[in-house]
Amino acid sequence: MEIEIVPLDPATLKTAPTSDFGFGTNFANRMFTQNYTKGEGWHSAKIGPYENLSLPPSTAVLHYSQEIFEGLKAYRRPDGNINLFRPWENMKRFNNSAMRMAMPAVDPEEHLTAIAQLVEIEHDWVPTAEGSSLYIRPAMIATDAALGVYSSHTYLHFVIVCPVGAYFAAGFNPISVFISDSYRRAVKGGVGATKTGGNYSASLFVSEQVKEQGYSQVLWLDAIEGKYIEEVGAMNICFVYEGKKIVTPPLTGSILPGITRMSVLELGRDLGYEVSEERTSIDDILADIESGKITEVFGCGTAAVIAPVGKFGYADKEYTINDYQVGDVSKHLYDELTGIQYGRIPDRFGWTYTIEVE
Ligand SMILES: Cc1ncc(COP(=O)(O)O)c(C=O)c1O
């Protein structure tokens, strides 16, 4: 793939912010784009200005949501260079999502090269403030201008980047999670394991409701029996038993296969914890929280890395975990994972992809 680098007028360039990043509102000056046409494949790869897209109102994605995305981060290392964390996994998941949504695959190596080149050019936008990073959002949308319900013949693939601050701006604090008893996120055989926008728009009604009740996230139960733990908003979920064993639900097809989840399982084992993928019922989890057998609960995902859960709300009752304090296992995993991501500790797993800019 030849990537055309479009020269930009220096007078039009915005300066990268160094604080008050917000989330997903202040984008770097450039973006990567390429187009797909059936019969021709991917073409017109370029890194050009971050600018509005011009699409006819009939564009397929606007009606039937044929779209996918990814989310990963670039971290500033102490030596000034930049780390991506397990980007190969994001490239793979992007293509798995593409396959499920009847969209064309993108060559994983070329996709990663495009991202690395964009980050290298925009390296000033990778912030240095404690806990900050550059969020990278690859996406693909169906662009046929036609209202027929069919798999589009044309697509736009783009990558945009924006600096983001520390997820825990006020320190590493537990979050509160409401367990939804009436609404379901995804069913086996559906698109729950796919990173497609519809999964997120379908969750908004419930997340707005639980916010009004003072909770920050929703935990979903399986859609068939309403009994088994699945995942939280944009995170997978882990339970710690007696400070020694880490348990997370298995990938049965209705939850997103998180890259942080995969890393927690591998790292947890390496650090000497017992780790296990187990189907667990909400009744057992709540009983084990009440008896003190479950000593910690945490969500894991790219945004927060590790988010300790301080309490669950379920059917008019609240269940406090570890006295609403950050537990030792959550802190241990958080320190190790962020240490590897930011290049503060050696990467013994080969998880990082370093972009040299210094
Ligand atoms: C629904 C959902 N589950 C889990 C995750 C965690 O995945 P990852 O660790 O790859 O960020 C995400 C975030 O992308 C998500 O959107």
Image (spheres, rainbow, N blue to C red):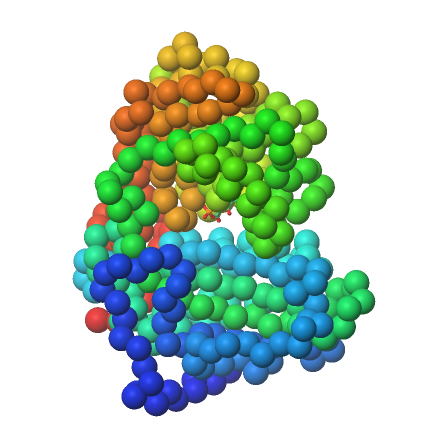
Residue 171 placement (x, y as % from top left): 24, 40
Q: Residue at x 40, y 77 (%)?
A: 30
Q: Nearer the viewer, residue 235 or 209?
A: 209
Instruction: Give the answer, above or below, for where 85 lies relative to 203.
Output: below
Residue 128 placement (x, y as % from top left): 22, 60
Q: Nearer the viewer, residue 178 or 187?
A: 178
- Left or right, 192 with respect to 128, comes to right
- Left or right, 93 with respect to 148, comes to left
Q: Residue at x 49, y 35 (%)?
A: 210
Q: Residue at x 57, y 20 (%)?
A: 281
Residue 252 placement (x, y as % from top left): 62, 35
- Left or right, 165 with respect to 52, comes to left
The answer to whether any part of residue 348 appears in the image is no
Quadrant of residue 141 within the rendered picture: bottom right
Quadrant of residue 14 within the rendered picture: bottom left
Q: Considering the image in quadrants, where does the C terminus appear?
A: bottom left
The answer to whether any part of residue 146 appears in the image is yes
- Left or right, 315 with respect to 16, comes to right
Quadrant of residue 257 within the rendered picture: top right
Q: Residue at x 43, y 81 (%)?
A: 49
Instruction: Give the answer, above or below, for where 222 lies relative to 25.
Output: above
How many numbered markers are drawn? 0
Q: Nearer the viewer, residue 271 or 283?
A: 283
